[in-house]
Amino acid sequence: MIRISALLLVLMLLTSSYLFMSLPAKAGSETIVVPDDYSTIKEAINAAKEGDTIFVKKGTYEEKTLNIDKAISLTGEDREYTKINLYPPLYQTDDIKWLWSYYGFAITVNANDFKLSGFTIDTPNVTNLHGGAISIIGNKTQIIGNKITPSLSVKGSYANIEENTLSRGVRLHGSYGHISENIIDGSGSIHCRGSYNSVNANNVAGRNNWGINVGGDFCLVYGNRVTDSNSVCIYVDSDGTIVGKNSVDNCGIGIDITGSNNVVYGNLITNCGVKPSVFAPDIESSQGSGIRASGSNFIFANSIAKNVVGTRIYRHNRTNLMSNLYHNNFIDNTLQVSTRYILYGSDSFDNGKEGNYWSDYTGEDVNGDGISDSPYVIDANRSDRYPLMAPFDIDGVKLDLSDWMSPPLIDLISPTNTTYVPADVTLEFTVSKQTSWLSYSLDDKANLTITGNITLGKLAYGSHKIQVYATDLVGHKSTSETTYFSVLEPFPATLLLASIGTTLVVVLGLLVYFKKRKR
């Protein structure tokens, strides 16, 4: 009987192993190491699959160009010692009048969820500024912690570009992007087009073009330092944008605002403006200034000091708009306020109770309330009715920027990167802040609006991927990490019954056999 039981156990194990031979492997991404797995980065890119990471060890890698069309992460071991030299092709065009030369793209990316980090990237053969750029088209691009010599162009929403040194700057075309803590140390600038973008804590210096150029509504330009530009330090063509706590120095125009309902506060603007010359013999015609604004905006608590012209308020057209300026410190500007432009609105240099501090004001404060007893007269049409006797405490002004500085964070709990048996799969997640809209996308299909956790229902057998999207109350959007998972196809019922039947027949046959032998 012991021999019979052992034989039956072996048969059962064989049957069970046969039943599970067709189970799919667990879904997941892989890490490819250069030069261990492939000697060149290009070869590793060609071999990579969606979601893979290419880890590049320290060294110098000579590549012609890199073309990427899949969601991968390209990660260097150390940006100071992991260097990629790229040699984009040189093209020439002849349009009859002259011969023009330009370089093709050094890196081309056409994919969502691309990440580049930890590299020094150079184009040694690009001898001028025509071409040789890094071009990325796709949403949720991440460019983090690199030193990049060629210009960087990103087209897509939800981009994150931070902690890079960018010699020729960055151009972002898309919404809900984040450009922060970058150093622009060459001839480039930060050029950003799209709504709900944030540009903060960048250091931009030493170029002849615009330092930070933002176009698009409801953006944030905060805590940047921009210096030494013959043009505009910070230019904003927008409605509803916050320009706060920036430091600008030695520029043609410190901050230039075109649009309405923008808030300009807490900025330090010094040594800006264009001094009189043969072509512009007087200050009024020199155009430069600390702050230049058009539209209906709120300009308060700024330090505007030692500029050729403190501020210029003007109109593009004859609309009856009002800009409100108060709690600003106008200190030792050659001309505190430009009066060159005719007023079509009713600009106000106070908030109805308090105005600005003027370093050249000579009025008195008899009752000692800190507000002068007589107005500061700018011209026949402009005056500050309540000038301050002492500089305003700009550092004490605070705005709640938590909704701007921290977009909603999404933690996707279920599904996870695993294989599920045929059953309802639960979509479970958490969001860090209150939202106005939630949705999810399964297998790159159209987003489906939801109000919280749900059951996904009967899913097709095979591989899947899912993402969750959230929009907060001020319009900032976030996307969860992509989760890859699979649903197991069940073992066919007919084959299962046949296997069980075969096993029973064998078992019965063996029982009969051993019974006869025993007799």
Image (cartoon, helix red, strand yellow):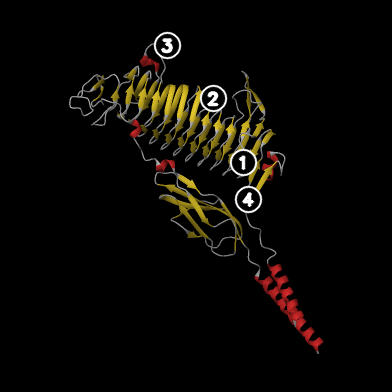
Q: Which mark is residue 90?
A: none
Q: Residue at x 47, y 41 (%)?
A: 176
Write down the residue under mark 1: 75
As measured in the structure, the alpha-carbon distance from the residue carrying label 3 to the one carrying label 1 is: 51 Å
Q: Position of residue 387 (x, y in %)?
A: 25, 25
Write down the residue under mark 4: 29
Write down the residue under mark 2: 187
- Res 289 visible: yes
- Res 316 visible: no
Instruction: First in sequence, mark 2 or 3: give its number.
Output: 2
Kindly identify the amino acid type of the residue bearing the numbered disc 2.
Ser
Q: How dense is the environment of label 4, judged by Cα within 10 Å: few (below 14), some, or many (20 and up)? A: some
Kindly identify the amino acid type of the residue bearing the numbered disc 3.
Ser
Write down the residue under mark 3: 277
4 and 2 marks in contact (CB < 8 Å): no
Pair 4/3: label in front: 4
Instruction: First in sequence, mark 2 or 1: give its number.
Output: 1
As measured in the structure, the alpha-carbon distance from the residue carrying label 2 to the one carrying label 1 is: 26 Å
Q: How dense is the environment of label 3, judged by Cα within 10 Å: few (below 14), some, or many (20 and up)? A: few
Describe residue 310's horizontal placement relative to residue 67 as left or right: left
Outermost residue, bottom direction? 519
As measured in the structure, the alpha-carbon distance from the residue carrying label 2 to the one carrying label 3 is: 26 Å
